[in-house]
């Protein structure tokens, strides 16, 4: 089992607009500056009724080392692991290749790759804001990713271990 180390960055925001600004800044690191090989990102919004919805996401479709696939990435998986109802609210089950199977597999990989304590802390931090940005990237890009998340009230960094071969296998089985 070959485990790869990724970093999850979770920003807490007082508005969805601020989270989207930082989402775009992370995206620019990839497209304009060419600095991020592969990353996943998801902007979440807490509705007045307390439910969480994914309002914007990016999943790199082809990854070095084979991680990813099926249009569902580790950032979305992490959001669903923290807030299972986000899959329903965001229409992710109907909109994804392999639907629930792929989403469940990615949520499982994201949750299994992080300690329970870290998952609990991330969930509690996201509960404190109106919006959030979850970015999963390669471990050596941490300072650059965190550096562009300037609108966040707070940014939390957690290590995420993932077996890229298993993720690829699950993605292929679901599609």
Image (cartoon, rainbow, N blue to C red):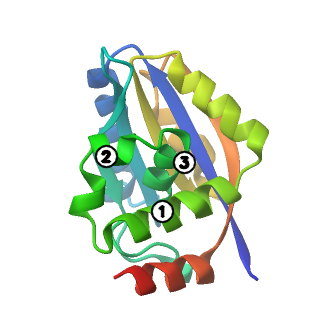
Using a 10 Å C-alpha cutoff, classify the residue at mark 3 as few (fewer than 14 neighbours), some (14 to 19) or many (20 or more).
many
Q: Is residue 118 above or below residue 125?
A: below
- Decide which of tag 3 and tag 2 comes sooner along the chain: 3
What label does residue 85 carry, if any? none
Q: Residue at x 55, y 40 (%)?
A: 82
Q: Is residue 32 visible?
A: no
Q: Residue at x 50, y 80 (%)?
A: 170
Using a 10 Å C-alpha cutoff, classify the residue at mark 1 as few (fewer than 14 neighbours), some (14 to 19) or many (20 or more).
many
Q: Nearer the viewer, residue 153 or 110?
A: 110
Q: Secondary structure at mark 3?
A: helix
Q: Secondary structure at mark 2?
A: helix
Q: Is residue 103 above or below residue 98?
A: above
Q: Residue at x 28, y 40 (%)?
A: 89
- Quarter of the figure with residue 144: top right
What label does residue 81 carry, if any? 3
Going by the image, does 106 lie left or right of 175?
right
Give the residue pinned by disc 1: 104
What label does residue 88 carry, if any? 2
Q: Residue at x 48, y 44 (%)?
A: 79
Where residue 24 sits in the image (x, y, percent)? 30, 40
């Amino acid at each position: 089992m070959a485990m790869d180390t990724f970093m999850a960055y979770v920003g807490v925001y007082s508005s969805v607009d601020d989270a989207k600004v930082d989402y775009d800044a992370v995206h620019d690191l990839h497209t304009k500056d060419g600095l991020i090989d592969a990353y996943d990102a998801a902007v979440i919004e807490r509705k007045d009724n307390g439910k969480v919805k994914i309002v914007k996401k990016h999943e790199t479709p082809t990854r070095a080392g084979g991680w990813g696939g099926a249009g569902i990435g580790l950032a979305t998986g992490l959001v669903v692991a923290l807030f299972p109802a986000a899959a329903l609210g965001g229409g992710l089950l109907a909109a994804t290749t392999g639907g629930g199977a792929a989403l469940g597999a990615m949520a499982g990989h994201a949750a299994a790759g992080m300690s329970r304590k870290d998952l609990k802390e991330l969930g509690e931090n996201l509960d404190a804001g109106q919006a959030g940005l979850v970015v999963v990237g390669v471990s050596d890009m941490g300072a650059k990713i965190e550096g562009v998340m300037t609108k966040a009230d707070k940014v939390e960094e957690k290590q995420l271990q993932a077996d890229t071969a298993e993720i690829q296998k699950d993605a292929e089985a679901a599609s």
